[in-house]
Amino acid sequence: MLNRSASSYFPNLGSNAVVQLIIALGVAFVTLGFLHAILLLMHFPADVYDNILAHTALGNIHDYPSRFWTIFTFGLFHIGFWELFSNMIWLYCFGSLVQMLIGYKQVIPIFFYSLLTGGACYLLCQLIPGRFFTGYFLLGPQAGIIGLAVAAITLSPVYRFYFTPTFSVPLYVIACIFAFFMILNTGMDVPKILQLTGGGLMGFGYVRLLRSGYKPGDWIYSLFSSIEHIATPQDNVTWKKNTRKRTQVLKGMQRPGNSSQSRIDDILDKINQKGYNSLSTDEKEILMRASKENK
């Protein structure tokens, strides 16, 4: 039985931020559900699971100082499967469009910046005098998804989704339907509505910053890249060595002579992936012959 990596099931996973988010949110949902099942099987009191949710979701602002991490966790989890399913459809719809228009490296920053802004609005609006806060916990990535929706509209307000060659729906219509269901799902709770508003404003502001020449999300991928280089120093050295060898071979020839250009390209790609020592004797001779033909 062959062992297959995750990338074989999801081609181009490294450059598809939308699928990465869907997988992450799916894993978080399964993890929470698995934990709930274990607690039920072991006959723990129901308030144990409720306490876990209270330390994962956003709640009363007066409890926030002792649960400061919840602004980073509330948007990663779902309670029900159908809520997860519908949110993933909307995430794929708007996230794929943003990814197509401005690249995959902007999707995750927009999503998380919108989540954080929405969470902050949810907490801060509780300071407004009046009986706004209903006492319910806030859990789910709706603010992040609506941030992507607003970003998509800001980028391309006239975009249309084509369901058939002759039938299409404008993006703003899809976004309005989404916003309607999101607001309806809040139960008209003011803090929840304001967290959606905050997420949408962040999506709009992020695109405006991009158009002004700023790149507020670059530091995230720079950080990931630095961590990866620290965690895999040997791979980094090998990659640099292979790239250096490939560059030397390229400098040694400008035209292929009698050798097949496609064959040489394949050999160069092999050097870049596996190193010069992985070449067979025939492949090395082809490179040497091509290099001499150019002299």
Image (cartoon, helix red, strand yellow):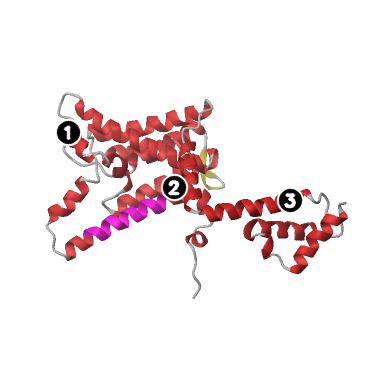
Q: Is 65 included in the stretch rendered in magenta?
A: no
User: Which of the numbered marks, if any, corresponds to residue 92?
Assistant: 2
Choose mark 1 or mark 3, whichever is in front. Answer: 3
Image check: 25 left or right of 9? left
Please state the horizontal and vertical placement of residue 123, each as a whole percent of the image. Answer: 24, 32
Is residue 169 visible to the viewer in this orientation of the structure? no
Q: Quadrant of residue 69?
A: top left
Q: Are marks 1 and 2 in contact (CB under 8 Å)?
A: no
Choose mark 1 or mark 2, whichever is in front. Answer: 1
Instruction: Tell me the CA gap for discs 1 and 3.
Output: 63 Å
Categorize mark 1 by other alpha carbons within 10 Å: few (<14), some (14-19), many (20+).
few
Magenta segment, which residues?
21-36
Q: Is 28 included in the stretch rendered in magenta?
A: yes
Q: Which residue ends up furthest to the top in the rendered image?
A: 129
Image check: 254 left or right of 122? right
Q: Amino acid at mark 1?
A: His
Please state the horizontal and vertical placement of residue 113, each as a whole percent of the image. Answer: 39, 36
Q: Amino acid at mark 2?
A: Tyr
Image check: 4 left or right of 277? left
Please state the horizontal and vertical placement of residue 110, each as a whole percent of the image. Answer: 43, 37
Q: Is residue 238 above or below residue 201?
A: below
Choose mark 3 or mark 2, whichever is in front. Answer: 3
Q: Which residue is mark 3?
A: 248
Q: Secondary structure at mark 2?
A: helix
Please state the horizontal and vertical placement of residue 3, each as a whole percent of the image. Answer: 49, 70
